[in-house]
């Protein structure tokens, strides 16, 4: 027996999620349709709204519904410090740790040769324009302490120092292989305070 096309379509759509294979996609589809119709409607609406209304902040590249995100629009933030992170979740962690008063740039990724992510995929033109706006005096590299995060930090420090920008890297209080998203806030704050020039 074959599935109705609409069901097959939903199952194959769910497989776009990371780590979701055919079996779990099928389970999710049955769950949404059979057990949680309201949840499914909510999900469909949220996805539609996010896709139509979210864009990238013109300055920091994070997700935003407005041209400038609320952080970049906040005049009380220090304009002379720019912290580079991999993902919006890292920015949220640093904000929760309350250890940084400057502004951010979100790469929306990291160098990852195995996944075919090279420098051209990391919005480097946008980053350079941001770092060279004439007000930024220090760029703080807060990519993860994974192999990919370290390679990314190295590439960025070379790129920025080449343009005469002062660059620092958050300190290694972080566990080796550590991802910002998963360390405790105290450790993260300490790593920012003890950052070193590179
Ligand atoms: Zn922004």
Image: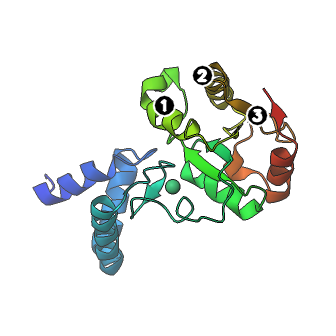
Residue count near mark 2 (Cα–Cα under 10 Å), binned few <14, some 14–19, many ≥20 = some
Is the CB–ligand 1 distance for label 3 below 8 Å? no
SS for callout 1? helix
Instruction: Judge by depth and name the residue closer to the eye, 134 or 1.
Output: 134
Q: Is residue 134 left or right of residue 167?
A: left
Mark 2 or 3 closer to N-term? 2
Q: Position of residue 4 (x, y in %)?
A: 12, 58
Q: Nearer the viewer, residue 186 or 134?
A: 134
Q: Position of residue 85 (x, y in %)?
A: 62, 43
Q: How many angstroms separate mark 1 from mark 2 (CA)?
A: 9 Å
**Label 1 – label 3 distance at C-alpha:** 18 Å
* Disc on the earlier residue, 1 or 2: 1
Query: Please, which colouring scheme is shown?
Result: rainbow
Q: Looking at the image, is 145 positioned above or below residue 24?
A: above
Q: Secondary structure at mark 3?
A: strand
Q: Which mark is residue 124?
A: 1
> Along the polypeptide, which appears first: circle 1 or circle 3?
1
- Residue sitting at x 58%, y 41%: 86
The correct choice, above or below, for 138 with respect to 95 in the image is: above
- 193 left or right, relative to 143: right
What is the crowding at mark 1: few (fewer than 14 residues within 10 Å), some, or many (at least 20)?
some
Question: Which residue is denoted by mark 2 in the rendering?
Answer: 159
Cα separation, mark 2 vs mark 3, equals: 13 Å
Residue 91 locus on image (x, y percent): 62, 53
Which residue lies most toward the bottom here?
38
Q: Nearer the viewer, residue 164 or 62?
A: 164
Q: Residue at x 27, y 65 (%)?
A: 48
Please provide percent x and percent y for residue 155: 61, 22
Residue 168 circle label: 3
* Front position in the image: 142 or 32: 142
Residue 195 appears in the rendering? yes
Q: Are marks 1 and 2 in contact (CB under 8 Å)?
A: yes
């Amino acid at each position: 027996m074959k599935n109705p096309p609409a069901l097959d379509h939903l199952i194959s759509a769910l497989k776009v999620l990371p780590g979701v294979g055919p079996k779990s996609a099928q389970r999710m589809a049955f769950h949404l349709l059979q057990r949680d119709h309201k949840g499914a409607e909510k999900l469909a609406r949220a996805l539609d709204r996010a896709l139509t209304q979210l864009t990238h902040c013109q300055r920091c590249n994070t997700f935003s519904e407005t041209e400038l995100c609320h952080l970049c629009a906040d005049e009380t933030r220090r304009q002379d410090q720019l912290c580079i992170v991999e993902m919006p979740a890292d920015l949220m962690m640093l904000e929760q740790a309350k250890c940084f008063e400057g502004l951010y740039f979100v790469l929306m990724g990291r160098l990852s040769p195995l996944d075919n992510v090279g420098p051209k995929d990391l919005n480097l033109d946008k980053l350079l324009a941001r770092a060279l706006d004439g007000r930024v005096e220090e760029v703080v590299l807060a990519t993860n302490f994974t192999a990919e995060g370290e390679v990314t930090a190295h590439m960025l420090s070379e790129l920025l120092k080449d343009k005469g920008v002062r660059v620092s890297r958050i300190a290694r209080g972080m566990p080796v292989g550590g991802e910002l998203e998963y360390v405790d806030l105290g450790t993260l704050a300490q790593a920012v305070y003890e950052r070193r020039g590179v």
